[in-house]
Image (cartoon, rainbow, N blue to C red):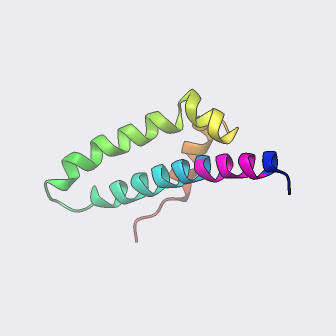
Protein backbone atom coordinates (compact mmCIF):
# COMPACT_ATOMS: atom_id res chain seq x y z
CA UNK A 1 0.00 0.00 0.00
CA UNK A 2 1.43 3.35 -0.99
CA UNK A 3 1.51 6.45 1.13
CA UNK A 4 -0.81 8.20 -1.34
CA UNK A 5 -3.35 5.39 -1.02
CA UNK A 6 -3.24 5.59 2.78
CA UNK A 7 -3.73 9.37 2.68
CA UNK A 8 -6.66 9.07 0.25
CA UNK A 9 -8.20 6.37 2.40
CA UNK A 10 -7.87 8.53 5.53
CA UNK A 11 -9.55 11.49 3.83
CA UNK A 12 -12.38 9.24 2.64
CA UNK A 13 -12.82 7.87 6.16
CA UNK A 14 -12.98 11.46 7.45
CA UNK A 15 -15.57 12.46 4.82
CA UNK A 16 -17.64 9.37 5.64
CA UNK A 17 -17.54 10.20 9.35
CA UNK A 18 -18.82 13.74 8.69
CA UNK A 19 -21.74 12.45 6.62
CA UNK A 20 -22.60 9.63 9.04
CA UNK A 21 -22.61 12.09 11.93
CA UNK A 22 -25.02 14.38 10.06
CA UNK A 23 -27.32 11.45 9.25
CA UNK A 24 -27.26 10.38 12.91
CA UNK A 25 -28.05 13.96 14.03
CA UNK A 26 -30.90 14.18 11.51
CA UNK A 27 -32.44 10.86 12.60
CA UNK A 28 -32.11 11.63 16.32
CA UNK A 29 -33.67 15.06 15.81
CA UNK A 30 -36.54 13.60 13.77
CA UNK A 31 -37.30 11.24 16.66
CA UNK A 32 -37.16 14.11 19.16
CA UNK A 33 -39.84 15.91 17.16
CA UNK A 34 -42.26 13.19 18.27
CA UNK A 35 -41.63 13.91 21.95
CA UNK A 36 -43.47 16.94 23.34
CA UNK A 37 -40.70 18.79 25.11
CA UNK A 38 -38.44 21.78 24.82
CA UNK A 39 -36.00 19.60 22.85
CA UNK A 40 -38.45 19.57 19.94
CA UNK A 41 -37.83 23.27 19.38
CA UNK A 42 -34.10 22.66 19.07
CA UNK A 43 -34.63 19.48 17.05
CA UNK A 44 -36.41 21.44 14.31
CA UNK A 45 -33.39 23.71 13.95
CA UNK A 46 -31.01 20.76 13.85
CA UNK A 47 -33.13 19.05 11.17
CA UNK A 48 -33.04 22.20 9.03
CA UNK A 49 -29.27 22.48 9.52
CA UNK A 50 -28.67 18.87 8.48
CA UNK A 51 -30.95 19.20 5.46
CA UNK A 52 -29.07 22.31 4.31
CA UNK A 53 -25.83 20.32 4.62
CA UNK A 54 -27.24 17.38 2.64
CA UNK A 55 -28.20 19.74 -0.18
CA UNK A 56 -24.93 21.68 -0.14
CA UNK A 57 -22.04 21.64 -2.57
CA UNK A 58 -19.83 20.53 0.32
CA UNK A 59 -21.93 17.35 0.75
CA UNK A 60 -21.62 16.65 -2.96
CA UNK A 61 -17.84 17.12 -2.81
CA UNK A 62 -17.55 14.76 0.17
CA UNK A 63 -19.77 12.05 -1.28
CA UNK A 64 -20.13 12.52 -5.03
CA UNK A 65 -23.89 12.11 -4.45
CA UNK A 66 -26.71 14.50 -5.35
CA UNK A 67 -27.83 15.75 -1.95
CA UNK A 68 -31.47 16.23 -2.94
CA UNK A 69 -31.70 12.60 -3.98
CA UNK A 70 -29.92 11.54 -0.79
CA UNK A 71 -32.29 13.57 1.38
CA UNK A 72 -35.34 12.15 -0.38
CA UNK A 73 -34.04 8.61 0.19
CA UNK A 74 -33.34 9.03 3.89
CA UNK A 75 -36.77 10.61 4.34
CA UNK A 76 -38.34 7.63 2.57
CA UNK A 77 -36.41 5.21 4.74
CA UNK A 78 -37.08 6.96 8.03
CA UNK A 79 -39.75 5.53 10.26
CA UNK A 80 -40.59 6.36 13.82
CA UNK A 81 -41.27 3.09 15.59
- Residue drawn at 19 percent across, 55 percent down: 39
Query: Would you say the magenta stretch is mainly helix, strand or loop?
Result: helix
Q: Nearer the viewer, residue 72 or 5?
A: 5
Task: Write the residue at 75% across / 52% down.
Answer: 6
x, y percent for residue 54: 52, 39
33 relative position to 8: left or right: left
Instruction: Please determine whether, in this image, residue 67 is positioned above or below residue 2.
Output: above
Camera-nearest residue between 43 and 3: 3
Residue 63 against residue 13 in the figure, above or below: above
Count of marks, rendered view:
0
Q: Is residue 7 magenta?
A: yes
Residue that appears at 28% across and 41% down = 45
Q: Is residue 8 left or right of residue 20?
A: right
**Residue 79 magenta-drawn?**
no
In the image, residue 17 above or below residue 45: below
Q: Position of residue 21 (x, y in %)?
A: 47, 54
Picture quadrant of residue 36: bottom left
Point out the stretch of residues depicted in magenta.
Answer: 6-14
The reply, left or right, for residue 34 in relation to residue 23 is left
- Whole-percent x and y of residue 55? 53, 33
Furthest residue to the top?
57
> x, y percentage for residue 31?
34, 61
| Image quarter of the N terminus | bottom right
Amino acid sequence: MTREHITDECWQDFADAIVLSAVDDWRRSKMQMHVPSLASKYAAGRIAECERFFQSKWFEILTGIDGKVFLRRIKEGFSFA
